[in-house]
């Protein structure tokens, strides 16, 4: 009887030790910047390649079906876009003029870089948040295509996230709709006249807003103002649209503003993305 | 054995394929969200007499799931083994039919999400709240039942038409 009790105690202690070891392992491996080793990368690349072949007929049929759905609504979309099309020419002319002015000013001030210089790499999404918990998507471009960890990812609407891990032919992207991010995003709120800098501290799952902090209560911000990346952090280049101001409140001491931002990108429908590489700055 | 392997590979690839057509945002998950690989390991339990081989299949599936889909190390291996132990216990008390196999699949899927939720919470990976957890559980239910029912019926029909013995 005594022996049995002793054995049960030993088993319980062993289980507790095992749980602690497992949690310790997970604490280390669940870190955002965990990189797959060469063996894991090889397996992932191989599986993705095989899956691409298996997926191809399915994707082909589904894409054709999606195309057909687009065609049904094309007349309505065309009517909606007509006023926008007429504005493009004037915007293009304005854009050319602004580029000229920017180049002239850079020459005048001897600046050979700006924070918004980057090149694009287009990629297709191959997995979206499998297992529901990780808030990541996987794309079909990797280190072979020049992708590196911390590169910024956008879609046609705006910022969606950053690269957190890479293999030779794939990359994992963590979406900005993650509650707590290690790298806070430095942003600029622009209402045409003023530019106010702040930091995105994370995403609120209940309100579905990105929360911006670090803005003095004396600053003037309006609902509907655009929010861009400021380029002041090490990762995100400037001028990438993030969203629009949705709600404005103040903190408990009435000293700072808390801004809620509606992300401009539709995170439920991400099929194609562009990975941005900020150009090297010659110091 | 080949039929079983094809079924597992198909389920594993479905996890990737279906994900590209469902919502990526954790708060707005689709009602078709589920984990096909976990359902497949529940369904195939009945076709294995050799438990070691069954466990080996589970571990390989879990390692691949860790590497390919979640970029984690051993997390899914441990959760899949826990699911295996639960299935084993359930199978001891409940024999399989169309109704009980669905119960087992739901238990397996819920166990996966409960374990993941607890581990992610303990390791401070991301502070998800109960609302998100319950949302994932709710959204996983419908497709788990659909896929379990379809694959149970199809596999049963195919397997007993061509094979009679269990995998030794």
Image: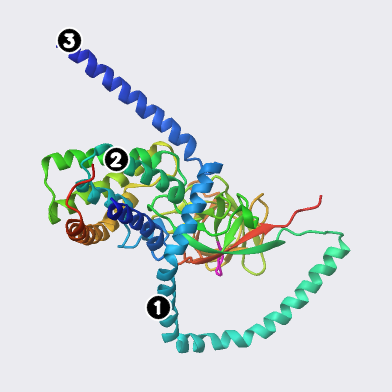
The residues tagged by marks 3 and 1 sit, at their Cα atoms, a distance apart of 70 Å
Q: Nearer the viewer, mark 2 or mark 1?
A: 2
Q: Is residue A283 above or below residue A64?
A: above
Question: Mark 2 — residue?
Answer: B53
Residue linked to disc 3 = A2
Q: Inspect the magenta stretch and tell me whether residue A156 lies in it.
A: yes
Q: Is residue A35 visible?
A: no
In the image, B14: left or right of A248? left
Magenta span covers which residues? A155-159
Q: Main secondary structure of the magenta part?
A: loop
- Using a 10 Å C-alpha cutoff, classify the residue at mark 1 as few (fewer than 14 neighbours), some (14 to 19) or many (20 or more): few
Identify the residue position indicated by label 1 in the image: A65
Chain letter behind tag 2: B
Q: Position of residue A170 (x, y in %)?
A: 54, 55
Q: Colour scheme in the image?
A: rainbow
> Is B24 on the left-hand or right-hand side of A3?
right
In the picture, the quarter occupied by the C terminus of chain B is top left
């Amino acid at each position: 009887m005594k022996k049995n009790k002793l054995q049960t105690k030993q088993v319980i202690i062993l289980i507790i030790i095992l749980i602690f070891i497992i949690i310790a392992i997970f604490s280390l491996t669940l870190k955002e910047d965990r990189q797959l080793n060469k063996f894991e990368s090889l397996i992932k690349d191989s599986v993705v390649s095989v899956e691409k072949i298996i997926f191809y007929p399915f994707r082909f049929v589904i894409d054709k079906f999606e195309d057909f759905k687009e065609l049904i609504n094309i007349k309505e979309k065309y009517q909606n876009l007509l006023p926008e099309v007429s504005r493009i020419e004037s915007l293009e002319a304005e854009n050319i003029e602004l580029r000229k002015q920017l180049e002239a000013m850079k020459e005048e001030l001897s600046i050979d870089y700006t924070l918004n210089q980057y090149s694009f790499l287009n990629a297709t999404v191959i997995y979206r948040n499998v297992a529901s918990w990780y808030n990541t998507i996987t794309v079909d471009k990797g280190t072979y295509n020049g992708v590196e960890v911390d590169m910024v990812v956008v879609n046609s609407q705006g910022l969606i996230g950053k690269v957190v891990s890479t293999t030779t032919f794939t990359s994992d992207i963590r979406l900005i709709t993650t509650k707590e991010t290690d790298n806070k995003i430095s942003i600029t709120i622009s209402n045409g006249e003023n530019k106010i800098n702040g930091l995105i501290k994370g995403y609120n799952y209940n309100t579905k807003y990105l929360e911006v902090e670090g803005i003095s209560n004396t600053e003037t911000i309006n609902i509907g103002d655009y929010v861009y990346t400021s380029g002041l952090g090490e990762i995100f280049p400037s001028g990438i649209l993030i969203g629009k101001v949705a709600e404005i409140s103040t903190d408990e001491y009435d000293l700072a503003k808390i801004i809620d931002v509606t992300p401009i990108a539709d995170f439920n429908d991400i099929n194609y993305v562009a990975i941005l590489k900020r150009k090297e700055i010659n110091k | 054995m080949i039929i079983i392997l094809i079924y597992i590979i198909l389920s594993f690839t479905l996890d990737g394929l279906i994900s590209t057509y469902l919502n990526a945002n954790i708060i707005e998950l689709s009602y078709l969200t589920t984990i096909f690989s976990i359902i497949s390991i529940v369904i195939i339990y009945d076709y294995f007499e050799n438990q070691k081989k069954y466990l080996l299949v589970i571990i390989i599936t879990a390692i691949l799931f860790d590497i390919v889909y979640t970029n984690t190390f051993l997390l899914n291996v441990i959760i899949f083994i826990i699911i295996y132990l639960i299935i084993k216990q359930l199978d001891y008390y409940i024999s399989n039919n169309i109704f009980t196999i669905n119960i087992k699949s739901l238990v397996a899927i819920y166990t996966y999400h409960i374990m993941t939720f607890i581990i992610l919470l303990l390791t401070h990976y991301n502070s998800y709240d109960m609302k998100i957890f319950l949302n994932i559980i709710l959204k996983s239910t419908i497709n788990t039942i659909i896929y379990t029912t379809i694959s149970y019926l199809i596999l049963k029909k195919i397997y007993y038409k061509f094979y009679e013995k269990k995998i030794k």
